[in-house]
Amino acid sequence: MKVLVIGGGGREHALVWKLAQSPRAARMWCAPGNAGIAAERLASNGSPVECVAIGAEDLPGLLAFAKGQGADLTVVGPDNPLGMGIVDLFQENGLRAWGPNRQAARFEASKSFSQEFMEKHGIPTARSGTFTESDQASRFAAALGGRCAVKADGLALGKGVLICRNMAQADDAIDAMLNRGEFGEAGRRVVIQELLEGMEVSLHALCDGHVARVFPTSQDHKRALDGDEGPNTGGMGTYSPAPFLDEAELVAVTQKIIEPWQRGCAADGIDFRGILYPGIMLTREGPKVLEFNARFGDPETQVYLPRLQSDLLELLDASARGALSDHQLEWSSQACVCVVMASEGYPGSYPKGRPIAGLEEAATLPNVKVFHAGTKSVDGVVVTSGGRVLGVTAWADDLAQARDLAYDAVKRIRFEGAQFRNDIAAKALQPGNRR
Ligand code: AMP
Ligand code: GLY
């Protein structure tokens, strides 16, 4: 098969790396890709993965490229092209793209849509309201004592959620979105949720319109600094499995969240083919959905795919064709840890173009894979080119060993101003946690 992957972050490097292992992959492109992706080769015939300079949101450019090359399957990584309807556009032009269509991508593209869906179909979530007027929004926040999450309704590159613990913060957040326009179009409507307390975990389910295959658990670390301090980021590190849900509890969560979601999709005529990624809070009253994403998590993908034993290309192809009932997902029992190395200043503004040393040395370690996120190659030197730069990933028989190995690799990699968290997976290793 000839495969085009869209995106150029750590998630897409992990996707390309795993897809390239498939015996069915005969040729692969990535648009726009990055320096790490450009260094991958296909297992079947040794040919390199070719990066092409087309942006992930340039839908006409991507369509023309896929058509011209006769791509058999286009795998869409990021949420924006999905929300823009890339899957529908490809279908209308006789091409197959993997990911939810525009209607199904609304689970991520519109928080108010998701919230109404969850309320309608009995999926446990936070108490919430949707507003376009700041006075009404403020009254709702006041009823919650100011303890709330104020969320831009639309896509805001993962930055559209403001956590408030008192009325002053809530009013400022509401004002920023609804009156000051600081979140653009995405923030012209807001969803306000009660603040949920508990442990947060990520779920992923691969869907084909009928069947949903649930992944093992993982946990992200959203805050920039150790101890969950500092601003929210796209994610500073992940590990899998997370010990806060055992097998039986994962089945229970699936019954409470994924199954009613599937029944709701069937009832409402939503044909969801792709990854459903609910962010879940394990509260004292049980698991509750914080939000739905409609794509692979980043950096969750970096810890899932090294554990996946099945052929990812087969699975995504089956998901797009509605044929997942013939496929099971096989997972290794090993644990996997990914530590993100980010640029100085991230998640705020950051410099680019800083040379990265030590990549070759890290690559010599067994059971380590350094996924590139924001990198590019300039005259043969790999330099930083994004906020999140690398996802240093390692796997081993248990979580403690996987974490030690990941940090051993991190120590060997250097670039000026590199920042990373020192406590990825630490919560899972505290005494008293299972596994
Ligand atoms: P979201 O993009 O909706 O997942 O929100 C980003 C982050 O904000 C989540 O990963 C949580 O850590 C936090 N968050 C969102 N909604 C809530 C909520 N209702 N209660 C507590 N924390 C939340
Ligand atoms: N890991 C956070 C995200 O992908 O949204």
Image (tube, rainbow, N blue to C red):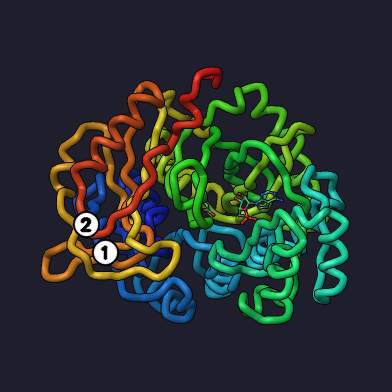
Tally the marks.
2
- Across and down, in percent, residue 21 comes to 31, 43
* Residue under numbered circle 1: 384
Q: Residue at x 85, y 44 (%)?
A: 122
Marks 2/1: CA distance?
A: 8 Å
Is 260 left, or right, of 154 in this rendering?
A: right
Q: Nearer the viewer, residue 325 or 38?
A: 38
**Residue 363 visible in the displayed image:** yes
Q: Evaluate if marks 2 and 1 touch, with contact meaning CB atoms under 8 Å apart.
A: yes
Label 1: which secondary element = strand
Farthest left residue in view: 379
Q: Amino acid at mark 2?
A: Phe
Q: Residue at x 81, y 74 (%)?
A: 134
Is 347 left, or right, of 279 in this rendering?
A: left
Vertical comparison of 36 with 157: above or below: above
User: Looking at the image, is mark 2 or mark 1 earlier in the sequence?
Assistant: 1
Label 2: which secondary element = loop
* Residue under numbered circle 2: 415
- Across and down, in percent, residue 22 comes to 34, 44
Vertical comparison of 164 with 241: above or below: below
